[in-house]
Amino acid sequence: QGLDEFQGAVEDCCCDYATVDALNQEFLHDILTKIVKTPFFRYFKVRLWCDCPFWPEDGLCQLRDCSVCECPENEFPASFKGLGSDHLTCQEGKPQGIVDRTMDAQAFQGWTETDNPWTHDDEAQNGDITYVNLLLNPEKFTGYTGVSAHKIWEAIYMQNCFKEGERDTCAERRVFYRLISGLHTSISTHIAGDYLLDEATTKWGKSYVMMHERVLMHPERVQNLYFTFLFVLRALTKAGAYLSQAEYSTGNDAEDQETHELVRRLVNCQQLRTACPIPFDEAQMWRGTDGAELKQQLQIHFRNISALMDCVGCEKCRLWGKLQILGLATALKILFSVEDSPAHTLDLQRNEVIALVNLLSRLSESLELVHEVANDIKTSNKLL
Ligand code: FAD
């Protein structure tokens, strides 16, 4: 099983699969891998308290009525309300789920604190903030599974009204569904790519079976991964001028200079401009008569998804969930909210830039992993 079936243009996008693969393999993956290791991009500011707005004050992981849910009452799955603490699989005690908080707050200075309309943003409130070194906390298998994890995914897909999924004839809702599904594919890819194969010997490696079952067996999930990659890439290039001139100061001039250079190489990538100048055409969105209303609705739903990240019952999953949802919210802000602001100017928080670039790097890595595993399975029968 290879990825041979993916040919032609990525649906809802402006580039074809082969071009995306060539760009990623030859340029983007390499630059992104270097950028996320730089001091500026490796520290993420985050509130990691499990203060789920859907759960009761007593901390028993049980959902109360949905306070921030903006969907009609009947769209909120009834089963969610009765989720008792017995079913919760909190993974805080597992070594693979623990967040290493070794960090350097010194490396994290300033930038503006502007609001992002697409996120339930609490990072601007500085209480209970942690700075996490992402390199010490790679996204991988943590053991978080079962009812708790499923309920979150279910709430993301169902409570937020993307019910029709792939088949939704409303292009805007379909785009939102595909963004979430693409991110979900990427998370599954990283879990399967860095999996605890043998608990007794603590042997880690790729789980071919898991990658096959969760990702490769579902071509539409892989297609959505490509879509999400192109969407985020478009946001990054649209913000190119802003990012080229931004401050990447962490107190070490030589390192900061290198970061700046890598960002410039990424946003000005000539090969990308030639082969895939507009990875996603945001001008096609919100054009119907109900465009403005739909946009407002989807913005509320996306904020709900962002709030749901506080319900993720495993700290490391919450860290990457929050980072990647903030990355998507930043892409949405760049593509859809800039014209709304009175000055028509883009203003990003430092954490938004870190989330956007790290998300793109995660997606780029997922594309590589999916190809690698598909080829291994095809050539050496790894599933047997
Ligand atoms: P799940 O991945 O839980 O999927 C639930 C259902 O969603 C599936 O049965 C299927 O119907 C549907 N589905 C699956 N993939 C897609 C897709 N791409 N598009 C559309 N529908 C889909 N676990 C870790 O080990 N490490 C992590 O870092 C981690 N991070 C997480 C972050 C978040 C925000 C959440 C909610 C969960 C995270 N988890 C993590 C848990 C992990 O995502 C799975 O929930 C868990 O491994 C159980 O997987 P599963 O195969 O049962 O199905």
Image: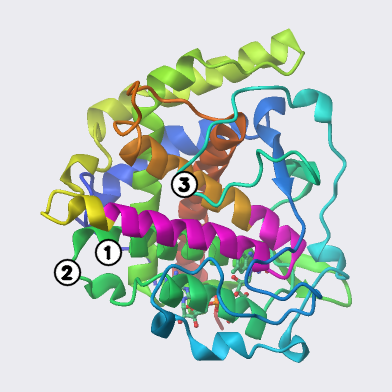
Residue on which disc 2 sits? 169
Sequence order check, earlier mark of 1 and 2:
2
- The kind of secondary structure the magenta stretch mainly shows is helix
- Above or below for 294 versus 233: below
Do the residues bearing badges 3 and 2 touch, measured as CB atoms within 8 Å? no
Q: Quadrant of the N terminus?
A: bottom left
In-image side of 133 versus 111 (left or right): right
In-image side of 198 versus 207 (left or right): right
Do the residues bearing badges 1 and 2 touch, measured as CB atoms within 8 Å? yes
- Residue type at the position of mark 1: Arg
Asked if the magenta segment contains residue 203, the reply would be: no
Q: Percent x, y for residue 332?
A: 39, 44
Does mark 2 have its CB less than 8 Å from ligand 1? no
Residue on which disc 1 sits? 174
Toward the viewer: 169 or 224?
169
Question: Over which residues does the magenta segment extend?
Answer: 295-320
- Residue type at the position of mark 3: Ala
Q: Check disc 1 and report its element: helix, strand or loop.
A: helix
Crowding around mark 3 (Cα neighbors within 10 Å: few <14, some 14 to 19, many 20+) is: many
Q: Percent x, y for residue 56?
A: 72, 76
